[in-house]
Amino acid sequence: QAVQMADEAIRLNPAMTKAYYHRGLSYQALKMHKKAIEDLRRVVKAVPGDEEARKHLQEAERDQMRVNFASAIRVNTFD
């Protein structure tokens, strides 16, 4: 529901960085890391001094790297 609320806020005001921030956090909580990264990058680009957004972006990027690594290991496992 949080994602839907943020979607609506963005639809009404695409320049509302707080909506992208909250949607990014919601995506991160849902383990939708790529979407979280996209939204949080937008926030960091628009507000470079937002350290919280930068911290959450780094967490999302780290989590996505873990997912990519785990996927690569599964693909390259020889049984």
Image (cartoon, helix red, strand yellow):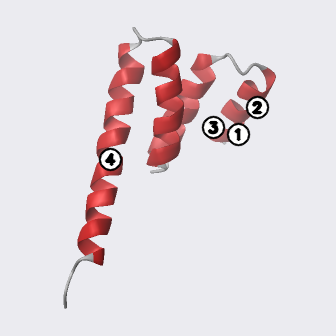
The percent position of residue 22, horizontal first and vertical second, equals 55, 28
Foreground disc of the pair 4, 2: 4
Which residue is the site of mark 2? 8
Which residue is the site of mark 1? 4
Which residue is the site of mark 4? 63
Mark 1 → mark 2, Cα distance in angstroms: 6 Å
Residue 2, numbered circle: 3
Task: Give me the residue at 80% from left, 22% from top.
Answer: 12
The percent position of residue 36, horizontal first and vertical second, equals 49, 39
Q: Secondary structure at mark 3?
A: helix
Q: Please report whichever mark, 3 or 2, sits nearer to the chain's N-terminal start.
A: 3
Foreground disc of the pair 3, 4: 4
Tell me, yes or no, whether the two marked residues, 3 and 1, touch with CB atoms within 8 Å. yes
Q: Please report whichever mark, 4 or 2, sits nearer to the chain's N-terminal start.
A: 2
Q: Please report whichever mark, 3 or 4, sits nearer to the chain's N-terminal start.
A: 3
Q: Please report whichever mark, 4 or 1, sits nearer to the chain's N-terminal start.
A: 1
Mark 3 → mark 1, Cα distance in angstroms: 5 Å
Tell me, yes or no, whether the two marked residues, 1 and 2, touch with CB atoms within 8 Å. yes
Q: Residues within 10 Å of mark 3 (few under 14, many from 20)?
A: few
